[in-house]
Amino acid sequence: MNILAVLIPISLILGGIGLFAFFWSVKNSQFDDPKGNAERILSDRFDDDPDGK
Amino acid sequence: MSAETPSIAACPACVALPDKGKLLPKLDPSEVAMRRVELSLPTVHCAACISAVERQLANRPDVFGARVNLTLKRVSITAADSADIESELIAELDRLGYPAKPLDSAVLAKAEGDKAGRDLLARLGVAGFAMMNVMLLSISVWAGAEGYTRDLMHWISAAIALPAVAFSGFPFYKSAWGALRRGRLNMDVPISLAILLASAVSLFETMEGGDHAYFDAALSLTFFLLIGRYLDYQTRATARSAASELAALEVQKARRITEDGEEEVPLDALREGDILAVAAGERLPADGVVTWGDSELDPSMLTGETLPQAVSEGAVVRAGMLNISGPLKIRAEGLGEDTLLKQITRLVETAETTRNKYTSLAEKAANIYAPAVHILSLLAFLGWGFATGDWRLAINIAAAVLIITCPCALGLAVPAVLAAASGRLFAQGVLLKDGVSLERLAEIDTVVFDKTGTLTTGKPALVNADDLPAEARDIAAALAQHSAHPLSKAIAHRFASDLTIENITEHPGFGTSGRLNGEEVRLGRADWCGAEPARQTAVWLRVGNQPPRAFLFEDEIRPEAAETVAALKAAGLKVQLLSGDVPQAAEAMAKAAGIEHWQAGASPAEKVDALNALAAEGHKVLMVGDGLNDAAALAAAQVSMSPASAVDASRSSADMIIISNDLSEVANAHRIAVASKKRIIENFTIAAVYNMISVPLALAGFATPLMAALAMSASSITVSLNSMRIGRMK
């Protein structure tokens, strides 16, 4: 069962990275224009300003 | 629609950097003052629109950045500051085929603060993260971990769950505390109690080395309920943002003439005796007397009458009338309590206060549910406590009852349906100001339409084209091309003409004249062309000394009106027409639209009375109207709609706004509302069935954390899936 001492921290760290990435994307207004993001992927123009600032 | 051709370039960077040779040199951003301009672009809808708009704007030397937000249908531009940058950008976008409207930055700033949404999203993220991890840890306990391993799992779960529950559950605690302080119960009281009690009991059990810990249940409860909360917030935020956009679109200002020239002033800064300039195409800002100019005024928004009134110096005019043909100067009078506008505002206020309070389905459910849950769990606690004398077991069972009954599905039942339905309606061009109005719309049995601007397009259409000789049509069209008068525009739009007329002059307030083959030709008002005024809206054409010919106009019925009325009747609703116009016009329109009951000549107060009479007979009425004279009736009805072309006062008192200006959305919205209500009730039933199965088990003491987790997830998922069916409805 000693493997738990390694696996549990690893799973928490991985989850924590996901959580941090989510916070970061919320903060960078990536959830402000969901419809636009869905359409922009069809455009052949390079989006050089994806966070819309 | 944009006609952008897909580029062949394979390298995205080549596409991103437009051909430098074609461009004017950009201004140096460090040398000019910057300004943010926000424009509303109601017609953008696809990827090609986005690139077309952004590319066109980026090609301007004075624009440093442009970003379209498709969700809000807006473009936000950073540009070099200059006095008329806004109107230049609007003209640029208009040329591209995207009509743009300026947004008032003050109103927008208020709507912008989307902090609450991000805050909820962050709490949702934390709850989701903690729930997944604790769930993983719990699986080993469910699978049969014992002794030291189980305690370790419980302790790690506690370390993750307690801070997460404290942070994520905060919106519920706050709302529950607010309700309790006022001595009331709301849905958040049992929610908060369940979360806190479950956490506390689990912590105690963990410390004592007990079997059951409900950390995962407390977290998944928080998570699912936050989803409901976030959906609810999103629905209201979209509606608010679109509504404030409408408010921002029409910031009515008056142009006051002073000794130093003209100045723009807000309406409440007007004083009695101010001289105001009103250009053709503008609405009169105040009641008053004409001091200079000749024109025609369209009173349809005010009274429902479509016949324009000719006015000249000395005529008494009312605020809200539309100036059609020539510039006017008016002296503002009676700005106090007796203006028509103020009277209508007062009527709206009275109607709003007397409108009876509507109890929404969610409130009804909470009223029954919250006390029931508390009593059940208290009874379980006391019953088990006295029967066995084991108070630790008793509090465990009480917590299990609270968690299992807890309105996970109930918290999602209403917001999930409303989010799906209002999203669906918004996509079709109907803006819902508030989700509850959808429930009210589902209950109606009568629809009352206004005539002018609602059943009709509000734009005049030529009716006697076939009776006119080709020559007259050609001359009229050639003259009409040069005028901005709405009737001229209608003629020019109807007939094409390549006739050349010389010396075309516009006579504001009268008409347009010119010379053809040495003869004078005139297109304009009856008295100016030497004719007797007609009984309906008309423009006259006189060629030389020949007798003048009338071009007769009627307010055109919307092409979808009859179809809409038929659809509403097919849905089992009674349809009525309530107009301020003369009886002949109202009757003709009622016949054309297929409406049997009509009432004409109704003043704003009489419209309210008519609606109150219907309500007294027990009818639940949907009012559809657009004029200033409808504003009070819209507020008095059970639920109301306005087309986007309506005046400010109507739009602000209507519950829903038809942004697409398509009347058939009335029948459509009703259908979706009925379906939504059905879904909400289905959701409540699903939640109740889950409770009926699981509550007896919990009361009997058989509930385990695994059961709680399964019941909660299963009911939430069923309810969400059922709600999403609204979006797929044909």
Image (tube, coloured by chain):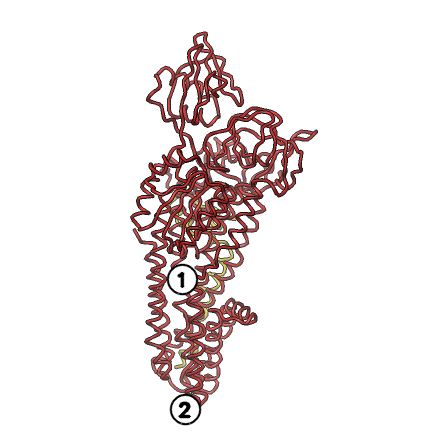
Judging from the image, what secondary structure is the residue with disc 1 in? helix
Could you say which disc has been placed on residue A28 in the image?
none
- Front residue of A46/B318: it is B318
Residue that appears at 44% across and 50% down:
B613
Identify the subunit bearing mark 2. B
On the image, which quarter does residue B545 sit in?
Answer: top left
Look at label 1 and name its amino acid: Val
The residue to which callout 1 is attached is B414
- Front residue of B717/B54: it is B717
Q: Is residue A43 above or below residue B281?
A: below
- Front residue of B584/B683: it is B584
x then y, percent, for residue B565: 33, 43
Identify the subunit bearing mark 1. B
> Between disc 2 and disc 1, whose residue precedes?
2
Q: Are marks 2 and 1 on the same chain?
A: yes
Look at label 2 and name its amino acid: Ala
Res. B466 visible in picture = yes
Q: According to the colouring, which chain is red?
A: B
x then y, percent, for residue B711: 35, 73
Q: Residues within 10 Å of mark 2 (few under 14, many from 20)?
A: few
Q: Colour of chain A?
A: yellow
Residue that appears at 57% across and 32% down:
B317
Q: How many marks?
A: 2
Could you say which disc has been placed on residue B387 in the image?
2
